[in-house]
Image (cartoon, helix red, strand yellow):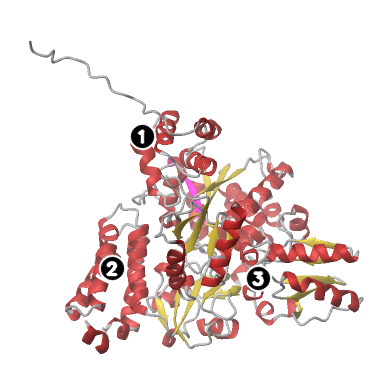
Amino acid sequence: MSKDPRRVIPIKLERPSSLSNEEQAAVLRACADSKDKPGALIPILHAVQDAIGFVPAEAVSQIAQQLNLSRAEVHGVVTFYHYFRTQRGGRHVVHLCRAEACQSVGAVALERHAKRSLGVDFHGTSADGAVTLEPVYCLGNCALGPAVMIDEELQGRVSPERFDELMRQLRSEVS
Amino acid sequence: MLKVYVPRDAAARSLGADATAIAIATEAARRGVAIELVRNGSRGLLWLEPLVELEMAGRRHAYGPVQPRDAVSLLDALQAAGERAPEHPLGLGPTEEIPYLKRQQRLTFARVGITDPRSLEDYLAHDGYRGLKTALALTPGQIVEQVTASGLRGRGGAAFPAGIKWKTVLGAPGAQKYIVCNADEGDSGTFSDRMVMEGDPFVLIEGMTIAGLATGADRGYIYLRWEYPDARRALEAAIQAAYAANYLGENVQGGGRRFDLEVRMGAGAYICGEETSLLESLEGKRGQVRFKPPLPALAGLFGKPTVINNVITFASVPIILDRGAEFYKNFGMGRSRGTLPLQLAGNVKQGGLIEVAFGMSLREILYEYGGGTLSGRPIRAVQVGGPLGAYMPESQFDTPLDYEAFAGVKAMLGHGGIVVFDDTADMAAQARYAMEFCAVESCGKCTPCRIGSTRGVEVIDRLVGGENAAAQEVLLRDLCETMTYGSLCALGGLTPYPVISCLNHFPEDFVKTKSAQASA
């Protein structure tokens, strides 16, 4: 007996979501708040990342559906911009400036120190989950480099010793 | 009541201005001394931040850098002084008399550091919204004429005459037009946009509103980089205040014209400082560069006629309308009219914001304002105009600050950022970084930029590694020529500037040293 060649193969549309209910609600809320604005996609992605710390794959399909875009289009936008993260990060994000003005006052050495002391490369998260290290190309603090941004707080004249002190403060806030 | 000013500028805060403000307020309260604490913008003397000012008999006296621990001694001095200016080891004298400030010609930055950026009343009390008042009495064509006659050129880097851009938008058919502010200040060594937005946000709003009146646009967007959260807070507070006082909205100051304004955040893409890429991003897409034509002035945001200018350009418009085109035009030299807010950065002793008329030499800025390097070593090179600007050696320091003079020595003034390097800098490493940066930030649309930048890193590595060096240099120069003439926008097109300038002016850094060769 031969198989019916017209047999319909069911396509599973949605994978079970790994997002919590709150996170799913945050994605829907971000869409509802902005989807009628012209050029809504980037404001929505910001709202999602602000709420849950990154832009998960599940959010991409939800956003695509809400904006009547393909998932590929949304994915393309998420991955174009350095700021959007597709993986969960640490409790704090440290952006370290790599640009020329900071290089002229020791940013390269600071970068080496930061990677070694946190035990990560760029985009990585320290083993204790406290800090994700990201590169950034200019924080606009070019007369007071090396500059670092911790979450949304700008720091200037960050020597390796100052960096360690700032990391100690971050970790003590957590515990 | 005694007024105490502690900046809320992000650079000042990065050195602890918030803690200083709290310490002063706490100490004053403990002593029962009544003070009014004002969180102003920064005066731009960044090496002195946190720079605290005390206002005595209508005159402001500066102290800096003031740490929280200095609050006690500062208040001691204040109480001992009575009516005179308090004597303190950190005292810098009357703020206006500090040479670094006194020698500047502050037009665009007239209020930055002086007013409270959160206060519309303060803005109005310091000549704010006088430009708009003038504009409301003019026809759109007359406003455009004023801007054209002032000689104002786009301050974002390309230096295109602002009036011509506005005229094109004014003449473009269409009911819907847009005003877009490029606040994606991504060039390393630049922070003038940030300082205006944080220190005097109303001037940007006023400039954009005037642009709306001039061209018939009723909607504006400020495309702001995410790296500037302080600027975002300042702008949003100012926009809210402007709406509440009818400086924005459906009937601006009863003139019968609508203008709405909104801040949109970027997401970390250097290329979005390129105008067409920025427009794509505002539309919610990947920030890929568009082909030109059509010009954004004719088919810009959502395909509609759009004025897109940099923060400083818009912020320079109110004073032009207020004081007249002639007033503004009388500053400057050649075809570079008015003033340019320079940003002195990197390895420099006295870094900060210096607004001067075009024409001053780079040397004056570096030594008379900058005071040489922070490290105390000789200056070896300066990069002017951001990551796409040339590295200039000492022999070019007498070049006057003028768009055409810089172009004449194959350099560019760009957005006015000046980054200083001392004699420990490895210029081959800087050339390599320029290519690496281009590879990271390329939008990927055109091949010379997307592929050329990666190949550039490899060729520089081989050149510096001494691997058939003469042939590699020929290859690198050839690659740079392809990028210059074959790229779609300035990113690929100008990356050769830093690379070739390093190669031409500092060839010794590209030669593998004998000891390194021996050990290889």
Position of residue B152 in the picture relative to residue B284 (left or right): right
Q: Which of B474 and A80 is in front in this view?
A: A80
Query: Which residue is label 3 attached to?
Result: B106
Percent x, y for residue A128? 48, 53
Q: Mark 2 lies on which chain?
A: B
Q: In this view, does B291 lie above or below B111?
A: above
Task: Identify the amino acid type marked 1.
Answer: Arg
- Of residues B451 and B488, the one drawn nearer to the viewer in this rendering: B451
Question: The numbered mark 3 sits on a residue in which chain?
Answer: B
The residue nearer to you, when weighing B130 against B54, is B54
> Which residue is label 1 attached to?
A71
Q: State the CA–CA distance, disc 1 to disc 2.
A: 34 Å
Mark 3 Cα shell of 10 Å, populated few (<14), some (14-19), many (≥20): some
Q: Which amino acid does the dot numbered 2 rest on?
A: Val
Q: In this rendered view, identify the residue nearer to me: B224 or B170.
A: B224
Q: Look at the numbered discs 1 and 2 and tell me whether their residues touch, using CB distance below 8 Å.
A: no
Of the two numbered discs 3 and 2 in the rendering, the one whose residue sits closer to the viewer: 2
Q: What element carries label 1?
A: helix
**Rendered view: A66 above or below B499:** above
To which quarter of the image does residue B199 belong?
bottom right
Magenta segment: B303-309
Q: What element carries label 3?
A: loop
Q: Label 2, on which residue?
A: B457
In the image, taking residue B460 as reference, residue B309 lies left or right, namely right
